Amino acid sequence: MVALAIHGGAGGDGPWKGPTDLDPDRIACMYGVLSRVGSLLESGVTALEAVTIAVEMLEDEPLFNAGRGSVLTEDGGITMDASIMNGSDYSAGSVVNVTRIRSPIRAARLVLDNGWPVMMNGDAADAFAVERGVEQVTQEWLRTSLRKAQWQKWKDSKAKPGSTDEDDKAVLDHDTEQMGTVGAVAIDYLGNLAAATSTGGMTGKPNGRIGDAPIIGAGTWADNKVAVSCTGVGEAFIRTCAAHEVAARFKAGESISSACNNMLDMVAPLGGRGGVIAIDAEGKIAIPFQTMLMYRGTWEDGVIKTGIGPDLFSH
Ligand code: ASP
């Protein structure tokens, strides 16, 4: 039994208003990832390689907030975080605030394969990846016009006299085009599990900010029982060790779905409403979210489903 779940970020408040003009492209990307990586899993690719390829493909879609098309920091730059974990041996790799590579998840995977250390940051992480063949790109290539426009909107609203933190948050939370962190979890034909997460973070984030995505146990976790990738306001996921919390609850006897929902209930009061995808060693998948929407999809027994709002659709 092999299976795969992916996400393209969670966000927004209030009831689902239906797809935007850009959503068909996002759905097409998710469908492409699920069909290619699902077939690869069927043909014997490991869960670790499957989640690497899935996230790499999602990073390459400029409409998701990872790799090209990442959101912009307070000074208009792009800094990206990613991590990956292999459940069978607890090996892990993470890169923080990389700025000049096409695929942060491939860099994290190279850190994992290298064996030591687990986390690398900034220019040293970029250099490590480029030396090992990850494509080097410019900030201008990473920055899309959509993200520049969103950043301008954030900046203008922030500059408004009398603007408060609450107003700033409203700009971030209500603009449903600003989300798009990506992640994947998979089980392979040997029953091994893996998880990966990659993000540009949050629009207007201060320089040096590190979210949950590159933190093993917060944004990403995999062991031999469960694999987890989270999305949402990272600070709250860090403060609850959210991805590991799902694993701890699952191993204490909660179902995969309860473990995910109970974790989200812990995170929400800390200001971190979001979503999570998880898969257990029997191939059971949970993909709950507490926001308006979460881009998500599953591949199970050759059946591909994708969704944005409350419902999932079979292809
Ligand atoms: N968790 C990501 C971060 O805080 C953002 C997201 O998932 O939308 O960097």
Image (tube, rainbow, N blue to C red):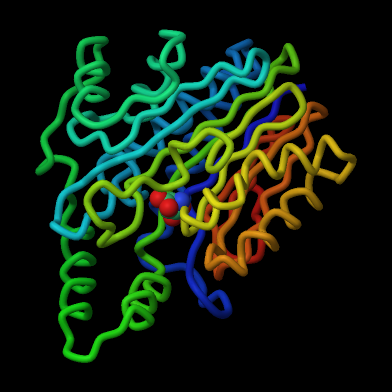
x, y (%) of residue 129? 26, 18
x, y (%) of residue 210? 36, 45
Vertical position of residue 217 compared to residue 28: above or below: above
Vertical position of residue 259 compared to residue 96: above or below: below
The residue at 23%/66% (across/down) is: 150
The residue at 34%/78% (across/down) is: 165
x, y (%) of residue 241? 60, 45
Residue that lies at the very extreme toward the front in this rendered image: 239
Vertical position of residue 2 compared to residue 231: above or below: above
Q: Which of the 4 quarters of the picture holds residue 111?
A: top left
Q: Quadrant of the N terminus?
A: top right
Compared across the picture, whether 115 is left or right of 249 comes to left
Who is closer to the viewer here, 169 or 301?
Answer: 169
Vertical position of residue 298 compared to residue 21: above or below: above
Residue that lies at the very extreme toward the bottom in this rendered image: 162
The residue at 90%/40% (across/down) is: 253
Residue 207 shows in the view: yes
Who is closer to the viewer here, 81 or 50?
Answer: 81
Q: Which of the 4 quarters of the picture holds residue 148?
A: bottom left
Compared across the picture, whether 22 is left or right of 221 comes to left
Number of labels in the image equals 0
Residue 315 shows in the view: no
Who is closer to the viewer here, 239 or 305?
Answer: 239
x, y (%) of residue 228? 63, 38
Residue that lies at the very extreme toward the right in this rendered image: 253
Compared across the picture, whether 36 is left or right of 68 comes to right
